[in-house]
Image (cartoon, grey):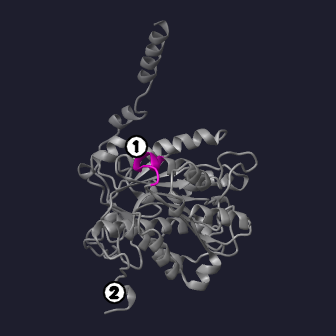
Amino acid sequence: MKAQLTLALLLLVSTSMYGQINKDLVKKAPKEKLAPMPHQVKGDSSVMKIKRDASTDIWRTEIDRSKILPGQMNVQRYELQLEAVGIKTFFQRPVVMTPEDLVKSKVDVAIMGAPTGALPHSAGNFWAPAEIRHTRDYGAYGAGSFPLSFIEYETLINPMASLNVVDYGDIGTNPYNQAHTLEEIRRVTREVAQTGAIPFVIGGDHSVPNGTFRGIVDVYGRKNVAFVHFDAHLDRGTGKFGAYYHSGSYMTMAVAEGLVDGKNVIQFGMSTPVFDQGDWDQVLKEGGTVYHLHEIRRDGVKAVFEDMMKKLKDIDLIYVSFDIDVFDMSYAPGTGSSSPTGMAPNDLFPMLRELAATKTIVGFDLVEFNPFYDNKGQQTARLCRRVLLQFLTGIAMKKDGIDPKYINPRVSGKP
C-alpha cells in the first residue's frame, strides 16, 4: 500500500512539473497582422506567376481526420506527399496496433517487421524492416484514390485502391534467445491471421518461418496450406552448429511435424553449391518439388510456373516464403547469402503477381535483406518493396476478379 501511495505521489508531482514551455511568452507577444511573403504582394510586377489548378496545393492539403477509418492511426499530415516527406511506415500506410482494430478497420493485409538476425551473415537483417520503410522510390504517396500512389507497372493497378493495407508495427525480438523470438513471431502472426487479414512479415533472417508458418497453421489447420519457397538455397536440415531453429530448419521440421504435406512444398530458384544430392533426394522422398535454376533457364520461367500450378491444383491456400537472394546478386547485393547466379526481376515479377492472383495467399514472409550489404542507391531495399508490390497487386486482382494474366493494353502495346 505504501509503495502504491509513493507511486501516486510521484506521478502527481511529475505531471505538475510539465507545461507548455513558452505558453506565457506567447500570451504576452504582440498580435500583429501577418506580413505577406514577397511573391504574395498583389500588384507587384516582379511577383512569381504561379499556375493555379486542382493540383497546385494538393501537396499541402492536410488529411481530413474525420474520414480516417475506425481503428487506424494515420501518422501522415498531408493527403499526398513526396517520398521524403512524412513519418515512415510501410508504403506510408496507416498504422494499426491491435487485432480488435484490424477487425474494426476491415484490414486486408497487415505488414509487420520481424527484425531478427540469427546467423553470423544475418546480423544486419535486424535493420531490414526499418530500411524498407524508409527506402526511396519514385513518385508520391497518398490515399489509394490518388493516381500518384503506388502503381504496378505492367497492370497499371494501384493495389492500395482495392486493398485495405496497414502497417502493424514490429514484432518484439529477444536478441539472445531465438526460440523465444520465434514464439512471439508465431503469436503475432496468429493474432493477425485470426482476424482474416493476411500477415506480411518482413524479416529478418530465414529462421522467421519457424514462427510465421506455425502461426498460419494454428489458424488454417495442419496440411491445409501449401508452402511455396523462393530462394537460391534449399534451406533443409536441422541442428546446424547445434542450433535447433535456424535458416535451414523450417521446412524439414514442418514436414516432419505434419504441419504441411510434403507434396505441397514447392521450392523455386535453387542455384548454390551448399547441399548435396542426399538433400535433394530427401525432398523427393517427401513428395516435394524443387525447381533448380538450371531447369528454369532451360524450360523458361513461364513453363515452370505452369508446372507449379498443376502441382498445386488440389490446394488453394498458399503460404509464400520469399528469400531476396533468389535474385542474382547483381540485382540484390544487399543480402549476406548472395549468389552470383539467380533470377532477374523482369522474369519473376509477372509470375509472382499471377501466383497471388490465382491462389489464396494466407501468409507471406520476405527475408534475408541485409541493409549493411546494400549499395548507396538502396538497390536491394527497393527491390524488396517491388516484390511486395507484385504480391499486393496479385491479391488485389484476385479480390476484384481480374484475370491473373492481365496486362494493361497500353503497356502491352495495344491501342
**Which of the 4 image quarters holds residue 19?**
top left
Q: Of the residues shown, which amino acid type is indicated by label 1?
A: Met
Q: In the rendering, at what x and y percent does residue 129 appear?
A: 54, 54
Q: Secondary structure at mark 1?
A: loop
In the picture of the structure, the residue carrying the numbered disc 2 is 409
Horizontal arrangement in the rendering, residue 403 relative to residue 296 (left or right): left
Instruction: Kindly report the distance in space between the C-alpha atoms of the residues bearing marks 1 and 2.
Output: 40 Å
The type of residue carrying mark 2 is Pro
Q: Give me the residue at 63% from left, 54% from top.
A: 125
Q: Residue at x 29, y 51 (%)?
A: 106
Q: Residue furthest left?
A: 66
Considering the whole magenta stretch, tell me its main secondary structure: helix
Dot 1: within a 10 Å radius of its alpha carbon, few (fewer than 14), some, or many (20 or more) residues?
A: some
Decide whether residue 280 is among the magenta residues: no
Q: Residue furthest right?
A: 241
Residue annotated with mark 1: 97
Q: Is residue 106 visible?
A: yes
348 to 9, vertically: above or below: below
- What residue occupies the far top of the structure in this picture? 2
Mark 2 or mark 1, which is nearer the start of the sequence?
1
| Magenta stretch holds residue 222 | yes
Q: Which mark is residue 210?
A: none
Q: Position of residue 300 (x, y in %)?
A: 55, 84
Q: Name the residue located 72 percent from the left edge and 64 percent from the top edge.
A: 278
Magenta-tinted stretch: 215-223
